Image (tube, grey):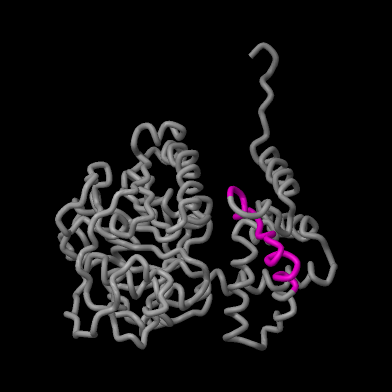
Amino acid sequence: MASSLLQLGFISHSPHSRPLPKPYPPLQQSRTLLTNSFAPFFDPPRARTELPSTTWRPPSESALSERPVLIIGAGAIGRRIALVWASNSRPVTLYDISDDALKAATEYLTDHLGDYCAQRGTHPGHVCTTSKLRIATTTGSHLSAPQTEVEEIEIDSGSKGPWMAIECLPENLDLKVDLLSTMEHYLPRDCILTSNSSSLMTSEMAPRLHYPERLMNTHYFIPPRNTMVELMSSTKTHENIFPFLEEQMRRVGLRPMTVPKGIQSQGFIMNRIWAACKRETLAVLAEGVAKPEDVDALWRDFFHAEKGPCLRMDEVGLDTVAMVEKHNLERKPGLGSKEVVEWLERNYVKKGKLGEKCRGGKGDGDGLYTKEERDRLKESQRAQRFGEVEETQGA
């Protein structure tokens, strides 16, 4: 089933453009828009004007079958999030300015979406991968997307634009704010804006947005293997968004866990605990106390876990691990992990040894483990967990 998704039309790449709808005027130029990395895709900033206040209302059930979830960033996490949201007959748009990233994402979805739906007893929704922001922000029914320019679509809750946008960019605050503060003017007025940041709180981004009441953190781990998602307010998030989004997540097989109202937690829930484990693991490796396979073997034995911390860091990407710890150090210099981060960057990140995320792109896939070591370990674990059952004689 998976190999035929492209032929069946469930996954498509759209090179066609629609004219961008007229945006609400961006904020004054003191914001970062003038140095925005995404500026080539947008009109020049206009003079600031007062914007109408909004009261968020959930989209209707019928609208959810037509309006896609927009995922910004087709990297290792973005394509996995796309798979989960597309697994329940939901339309999904996967946007990236890199054609290589979109190609790798298409291959991943083609290989896995059908199988994942078969396991859950669901049907795949249509996935559109695109490098055109016009299509990403305005298109609803991708299968019938016109080949030529069409009349502009009004930015309002009645449009077929995305009902939720999930930002999956690198852990850089300015980059994320640049994107979100620009995107909010082109997306439908009721579109929920979410950040998948693992270390940056949307409360840090909210003061630089026009519509912070639509903004929140939705922190995914490594879906679809991990189904938990942490939700946290930007301190301004409309309270009705949480019960609505929690219900939508449960429908696609995710398990949301919301940080209580009024609480801001740097690192949310799991990452605060996981950060301490990563720091000490990297310190053990940097000091030569043990090898990655030794650490993981002890971890698996003690916690009866499937994977150890070294393998998990390779899956996430060692550049992401380093960036997250840098953010932690900026806020808490007393953590004492500066030398560990420098060791990780010097021996791995700067050499392009980022782990599993390198596959299909730059780098050879080596990380704390070499590609060959990681493949052997995973095959060994697979055999132990799913051992072949010998048939009895004469059966």
Against 338, is 196 above or below? above
Q: Position of residue 107 (x, y in %)?
A: 49, 42
Report whether 97 appears left or right of 290.
left
Q: Which residues are magenta?
A: 343-360
Front-most of residues 124 and 326: 326
Q: Residue at x 62, y 54 (%)?
A: 362
- The magenta stretch spans residue 353: yes
Which residue is painted at 46% across and 78% down in the image? Answer: 174
Q: How many marks?
A: 0
Q: Position of residue 259 (x, y in %)?
A: 43, 74
Residue at 14%, 55% (x, y): give it. 151
* Residue in the picture at 70% in, 70% down: 345
Quadrant placement of the N terminus = top left
135 displayed left or right of 331: left
Point out residue 211 in the picture as x, y percentages from the top left corner.
Answer: 28, 77
- The quarter holding residue 293 reads bottom right
Q: Position of residue 257 (x, y in %)?
A: 43, 66
* Magenta: main secondary structure: helix
Q: Which quarter of the image is occupied by the C terminus?
A: top right
Position above or below: 74 against 108? below
Choose between 358 and 384: the one closer to the eye: 358
Residue most extreme to the top: 394
Q: Is residue 222 magenta?
A: no
Residue 260 vertical position relative to residue 163 in the rendered view, above or below: below
